[in-house]
Amino acid sequence: MSVTPLSATSNPSRPAPAFASNPEVLARVEAMRARYSKADPLGRLPDVDPRRIPRHIAVIMDGNGRWAKQRGFPRIFGHRNGARALRETVEEAGRLGVEAMTFYSFSLENWRRPPEEVQALMLLCVAYCEGEREALVRDDIRFRWIGRREGLPPEVLAALDSVVEATRNCTGPTLCVAVNYGSRAELADAAKQIAHEVAAGTLKPEGVTEESIASRLYAPDLPDPDLLIRTAGELRVSNYLLWQISYAEMYVTSTLWPDFDASCLHVAIREFAGRSRRFGGLDDSDAAGPLSSGDGCA
Ligand code: FPP
């Protein structure tokens, strides 16, 4: 194999970690770079084996309201700054070789918030899509969204769909936002679709399997998240990707979402890489490190 990791050329003064010359690691880095030319996991996080970089990270962005309140501003100020943090995080994820990130942006339960906050979040979603479209295309970031279409204002649907369309051919990291999303609703929608197919005779009852359910979720082509990050210290999963996070590792930080940045992502991934993932089996002897969730990363 003749692959030279970007890091080996970009910083010759840094001694290469032992795993950096492992052919499997080089092949993994090569695959990451083939998908996204800016991927340089060994350069960005030299102490982490690229084979332990999560493919998909799900994020519950919490603490926007508290962040704004601490500064004496209305809650929407926190959401606006939260939207900014989202971009920085996904760009760094791409450089680390992560394939996708899914951000909980507006849940079905969020409709219970005061109408002015709901309205401001809808406007922010439109502004985000319009403001980011060109930059996402330029940076080769593919945009997706998951959630129920019914109930969303037409302008929000049009804005989301237009960025999906504009970035359709991007091959870098996927930035997926969950909007008007609830995991139980997603599972109910999949069950309804399966019931229709069984009633129509196109699917046999015995054909209802884990795979057939998974393939009827909103983004069946994305790998299940390996890592679920929740900010602002809350220890809940809040009806988020319940099927998909069955074997995800959880990382909770006290950092409020608008303060989350590339270095916070490094801390989360470093901890993830040290975990032993058992998937119901026995210990993976390669892994070492704490199983506890992290403190603030700032
Ligand atoms: C939770 O913080 C955050 C949200 C409900 C909204 C997150 C939305 C964004 C960051 C905007 C991005 C949107 C799109 C579609 C790109 P919180 O308000 O519950 O904070 P608190 O717990 O401190 O009150």
Image (tube, rainbow, N blue to C red):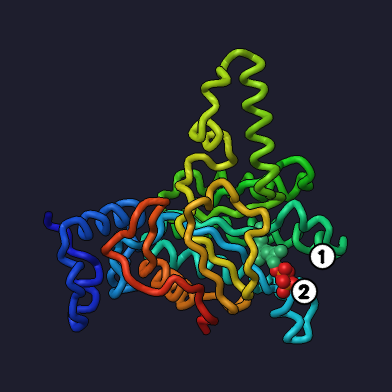
Q: Residue furthest front?
A: 282
Residue drawn where x is 56% and y is 53% of the image: 176
Residue denoted by label 2: 75
The reply to whether residue 116 is visible in this rendering is: yes
Which amino acid type corresponds to the residue marked 1 in the rendered image? Glu
Left-right relation of 110 to 134: right
Image position, residue 259 (x, y; %): 59, 78
Residue drawn where x is 41% and y is 61% of the image: 94
Image position, residue 218 (x, y; %): 59, 41
Q: Quadrant of ligand 1?
A: bottom right
Q: Does the closest atom of ligand 1 sit within 8 Å of the Cβ of label 2?
A: yes
Q: Secondary structure at mark 1?
A: helix
Residue denoted by label 1: 117
Label pair 1/2, CB-CB below 8 angstroms: yes
Q: Does the closest atom of ligand 1 sit within 8 Å of the Cβ of label 1?
A: yes
Q: Earlier in the sequence, mark 1 or mark 2?
A: 2
Image position, residue 188 (x, y; %): 68, 37
Q: Is residue 152 above or below residue 250?
A: above
Residue drawn where x is 39% and y is 66% of the image: 275
